[in-house]
Image (cartoon, rainbow, N blue to C red):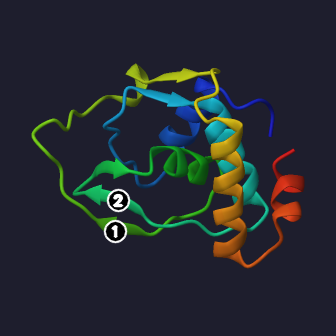
Amino acid sequence: MENINKEIILKAIKESETVLITTHNKLCLPIINRIYKKMINGLKFDDIKVCDTLIIDGHHRYVSSLLANIKLDEAKSSKTSATIEYDWMEVEFVEEEWDTEEKIKRLNELDAEFNNISIEKIIEMTK
């Protein structure tokens, strides 16, 4: 896939049969890109947490799954009084890396364990 950007993401959301509502107004493109690469290489991920049609936890996984054309399972969750709905058109998709090298390493280790593959294979697929 070409460089993932807001236009590509909005197109995938528009073409999706089931659109969930975001409760975040900002998402990280490098995180989406890493998860997308893992998904298209067959890695499995935890369910996203939803309350009715609101994403409570798993925004980056949800967007990545739409781009990879993979359906993630949903786990019921609850919202709080602080939960705010946003229109996907309002979401800012930032180029800034939110994860530290240490966090990326830890997430890769967890993904390797969850999928029963080597950490080296995970690192290779995310290049």
Residue closer to the observer: 75 or 101: 101
Amino acid type of disc 2?
A: Lys
The quarter of the picture where residue 45 lies is bottom right
Q: Which residue is mark 2?
A: 49
**Residue 99 place in picture, x, y as percent:** 61, 36
Query: Which residue occupies 57% across, 41% down?
Result: 12
- Quadrant where the N terminus sits is top right
Residue 35 higher or lower than 83, as above or below: below
Earlier sequence position, callout 2 versus callout 1: 2
Give the residue furthest to the left: 81
Q: Which residue is mark 1?
A: 75
Q: How many marks?
A: 2
Q: Secondary structure at mark 2?
A: strand
Q: Secondary structure at mark 1?
A: strand
Residue closer to the observer: 114 or 71: 114
Give the residue furthest to the bottom: 116
Query: Which residue occupies 52% across, 44% down?
Result: 60
Quick check: 75 left or right of 110? left
Residue 52 higher or lower than 90, as above or below: below
Residue closer to the observer: 118 or 12: 118
**Residue 9 place in picture, x, y as percent:** 58, 34
- Quadrant where the C terminus sits is top right
Q: Which mark is residue 18?
A: none
Query: Which residue occupies 54% across, 24% down?
Result: 93
CA neighbours of label 2 inside 10 A, class few (<14), some (14 to 19), many (20+): many
Quick check: 28 left or right of 50? right
Amino acid type of disc 1?
A: Ala
**Residue 31 place in picture, x, y as percent:** 63, 39
CA neighbours of label 1 inside 10 A, class few (<14), some (14 to 19), many (20+): few
Between the residue at mark 2 and the residue at mark 1, the CA separation in whole angstroms equals 5 Å
The quarter of the picture where residue 112 lies is bottom right
Whether tag 2 and tag 1 are in contact, CB under 8 A, the answer is yes
